[in-house]
Amino acid sequence: NKKLLDVKDLHVSFDTYAGEVKVLRGINFSVNEGESLAIVGESGSGKSVTVQTVMKLIPMPPGRIKQGEMIFDGEDLVNKSESEMQKIRGGKIGMIFQNPLSSLNPTMKIGNQIVEGILLHQDMTKQEAKERAIEMLRLVGIPTPEKRFNQYPHEFSGGMRQRVIIAIALACNPKLLIADEPTTALDVTIQAQILDLMNELKHKLNTAIIMITHDLGVVADIAERVIVMYGGEVMEEALVRDIFHNPEHPYTWGLLRSMPRLDIDREKENLESIDGTPPDLLAPPVGCPFAPRCEYAMKVCKEKKPGFFRISDTHKVACWLHHEDAPKVENPIVKQK
Ligand code: SF4
Ligand code: MG
């Protein structure tokens, strides 16, 4: 279980006319080799900016890494130059983004787009790269890859385009695949097929995955471990089964109550959304960022940030309810099991 990526106390801000927007405030997480980690949270929770920071894709300025380390494969990415990062992106770290349309060049044959990435990062001849590209198309389940190699993106369906993007991302055999909402734009059936494919490839190639999603259904399908983010901070970290069956943070409870679940017999009408809006990151709360929306908030929550309370070796939660002096509250998710 060797650590592949270890992000420590990461602080990121954007300098704007209105002031310093503190988008990440002390993020900690790690991913082991071959492991799949999901990062979940509502929009604006900081999940996309977290992975964009790891890839150094945030515009700097106005963005800046104020503090922290991002140790990837033994080296701190914080200190890497843009030219060093260009070798890592698409090489040791593959990326898949939300919109399969905008990630492909419409004027270039699919095969050449894969070959281009391979030649940029691998020491191969054009012919070897072409063979590798065809092998990748076959691996991601595209029929007649030799013929498809010479076609343009518009000749592919949305699901097939997403398969091509996965082929590009994996063509250089990355140690880590970062996927930001990779199935959100696809219909449900295609979404399931793409997630199946990603699971299959992960096992075949032993690639670690960081999957960003707001969809807990996707989490159940693909992740081994989950971190829950809110307002630019990590609220809870746990194995996937504990997130669903023994979640310990009121924000996670809210996320679970707002999604339809197959494993709990519940009517759709009972779905609740979490009331209130995310914190203003120009002036983040001094205490728990979730306090203004939390039905369990106590005086201490507004005054002091909760540290992490350890539930087990693999489960930790940033919530004052786990302090020994806090009132005992019933876990509303476990109760419904
Ligand atoms: Fe709610 Fe307090 Fe826990 Fe924050 S620390 S989630 S406000 S109970
Ligand atoms: Mg996002």
Image (tube, rainbow, N blue to C red):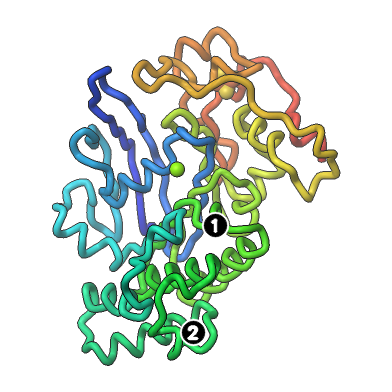
Give the labeled residue for mark 1.
183
Q: In which quarter of the image is the C terminus?
A: top right
SS for dot 1 = loop
Which quadrant would residue 19 be assigned to in this image?
top left
Number of disc labels: 2
- The answer to whether one can see residue 320 in this image is no
Callout 2 environment at 10 Å: few (<14), some (14 to 19), or many (20+)? some
In this image, 148 relative to 248: left or right? Answer: left
The answer to whether the residue bearing label 1 lies less than 8 angstroms from the nearest atom of ligand 2 is no
**Residue contact at pointers 1 and 2, CB within 8 angstroms:** no
The answer to whether the residue bearing label 2 lies less than 8 angstroms from the nearest atom of ligand 2 is no
Viewer-nearest residue: 150 or 194 = 150
Callout 1 environment at 10 Å: few (<14), some (14 to 19), or many (20+)? many
Q: Residue at x 42, y 19 (%)?
A: 280
Classify the position of ligand 1 by quadrant: top left, top right, bottom left or bottom right. top right
- Report x, y in % for residue 246: 69, 40
Above or below residue 63? Residue 214 is below
Above or below residue 144? Residue 302 is above
Above or below residue 52? Residue 324 is above
Q: Which residue is drawn at 49% across and 31% down?
A: 230
**Amino acid bearing label 2:** Arg
Viewer-nearest residue: 232 or 159 = 159
**Amino acid bearing label 1:** Thr
SS for dot 2 = helix
Above or below residue 6? Residue 311 is above
- Dot label at residue 138: 2
Q: Which of marks 1 and 2 is nearer the N terminus?
A: 2
